Amino acid sequence: MKRSVMFLVALAPAMAFMPSVAAAPAPGAPVVAILAFDNNSIGKDAKDFDGIGKGVMDLLITDLASSSKVRVVDRERVQQILAEHNLTKSGAIDAESAVRVGKLLGACYSIYGGFMRDLSGANVLTAHTTSNETGQIENPEKVQSKGDDVMALIAQLSSILSSDLKLTACGGGSSRSASTTPAQQGSTTKDAAAKPVTVPATETYAKPLNEQEKKQVESTKVDARTMLLYSRALDAIDHNDRAKATELLRQVVAKAPAPFPASEKLASLTKSGT
């Protein structure tokens, strides 16, 4: 008995430095697609924030992917579907387009919303879910802050979505198989007869962060202007403009040097020879 106690005491310091493991979503967790966030800012500088929603979308995906309650479709996969179906320039996301895109991604629910910089300089994020089976809009959420830290707002919204949403798997399961068509998922929109697409069984979901990584990302202060730079870098990546993406990501990393997805993306681009 004494030896066991001594062993545990000796092991404790080593255990304290063991990396935490990312929480894996439950096999039956519903699949969620996070879509674009519109710029709803008001005031003379409102247009300055056009495009910021792509960064908000990316970081919400990154943060919410750590929830064990849902499986979140990877942003690159969402972008691929938008491009393949000529939806990248279709404007603001509404309930009908959210259902259409969600079905193409094999998602039970779509989450989308808006970013707003108000006249006082405060930032506001709004979001809600749309069921891709029934088209019903639910779970309206709103978070706001007096300070200029968009990452803190995203973390707050992610926490609310992770804890408060009551989502269930759709169609008798959390996701359709690679051979299942959107029409087989059930539809309440004119997209019921959409062209079948193949959804890979792997590389579809965003990678969960472990507890330490999640804390590091959430604690990185990212103001609205830096978030806008990050959004533009993502847009450059989506348009295969690696030189522009690299330049913008370097600006982001200079402004937000703490652990942040921009650093990983910059390293990836640099490694690939840009």
Image (cartoon, grey):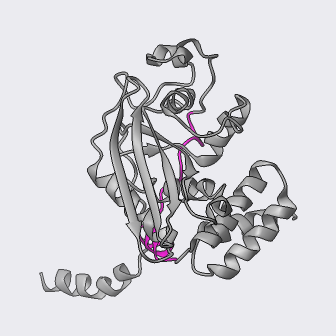
In the picture provided, is 120 more to the left or to the right than 7?
right
Give the image quarter of residue 49.
bottom right
- Figure quadrant of the C terminus: bottom right
On screen, residue 129 above or below 59: above
In the picture provided, is 159 more to the left or to the right than 8?
right
Across and down, in percent, residue 107 comes to: 47, 33
| Front residue of this view, candidates 158 and 263 | 158
Across and down, in percent, residue 25 comes to: 39, 47
Residue at (73, 68) in percent of width and height: 266
The furthest residue to the front:
44
| Front residue of this view, candidates 245 and 25 | 245
In the picture provided, is 184 more to the left or to the right than 1?
right
In the picture provided, is 160 more to the left or to the right than 227?
left
On screen, residue 169 above or below 139: above
On screen, residue 254 above or below 50: below
Q: Is residue 68 something one can see in this rendering?
A: no
Prevalent SS, magenta region:
loop
Residue at (67, 71) in percent of width and height: 263
Residue at (37, 27) in percent of width and height: 170
Across and down, in percent, residue 175 comes to: 45, 30
Q: Is residue 119 something one can see in this rendering?
A: yes
Chain part drawn in magenta: 201-220
Residue at (51, 75) in percent of width and height: 148
- Figure quadrant of the N terminus: bottom left
Tell me if residue 219 is in the magenta stretch.
yes
Tell me if residue 26 is in the magenta stretch.
no
